[in-house]
Image (cartoon, rainbow, N blue to C red):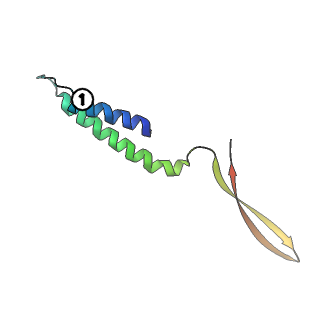
Amino acid sequence: MGVGSSIVVFAVGAILRFAVYVNSTHFSIHTIGVILMVVGAIGFVLSLAFWASWGGFGGYRRERTTLVRDDGFTRRETQDVIERP
C-alpha cells in the first residue's frame, strides 16, 4: 500500500466514521470507519518508513571501486555512480 492509497483508505474511513449516520443492528458502520482509519494510518507510516530504502524516483546509486597501480604501489579509488534509467 502506497502513500496515496493509504490516504484514500484513511479518508474513506473518516467519512464512514464522522459523516455517515446509519442505524443498523447487524454491524456498526462507525467501527468499520475506525478500522479503515487505523489501517490507512499504519499503511502511511510503513510507506514512509520503506520510502528511504526504496530510493525514490530516478535511479539508483552504487559505488565503483578501481585498483590503480602507479610507482609500484597499488591504491583503491572509490567513486559514487548514480545511474538513471
Q: Residue at x 29, y 35 (%)?
A: 36
Please give left or right for residue 68 compared with residue 31 in the image: right
Q: Is residue 56 above or below residue 31?
A: below
Tell which of 19 and 63 is nearer to you: 19
Please identify the residue farthest to the front as the structure is shown: 19
Q: Residue at x 68, y 45 (%)?
A: 84
Please identify the residue farthest to the right as the structure is shown: 71
How crowded is the residue under tag 1: few (<14 C-alpha within 10 Å), some, or many (20+)? many
Q: Residue at x 43, y 36 (%)?
A: 4
Helix, strand or loop at label 1? It is helix
Q: Which residue is the site of mark 1?
A: 16
Q: Is residue 1 visible?
A: no
Q: Is residue 75 above or below residue 32?
A: below
Please identify the residue farthest to the bottom as the structure is shown: 72
Q: Quadrant of residue 27?
A: top left
Kind of residue at badge 1: Leu
Q: Is residue 85 visible?
A: yes
Locate the N terminus by quadrant. top left
Q: Position of residue 41 (x, y in %)?
A: 33, 43
Locate the C terminus by quadrant. top right
Q: Residue at x 38, y 37 (%)?
A: 6
Q: Position of residue 69 (x, y in %)?
A: 85, 71
Q: Is residue 34 above or below residue 50?
A: above
Please give left or right for residue 70 compared with residue 1 in the image: right
What is the count of numbered marks? 1
Q: Position of residue 73 (x, y in %)?
A: 83, 77
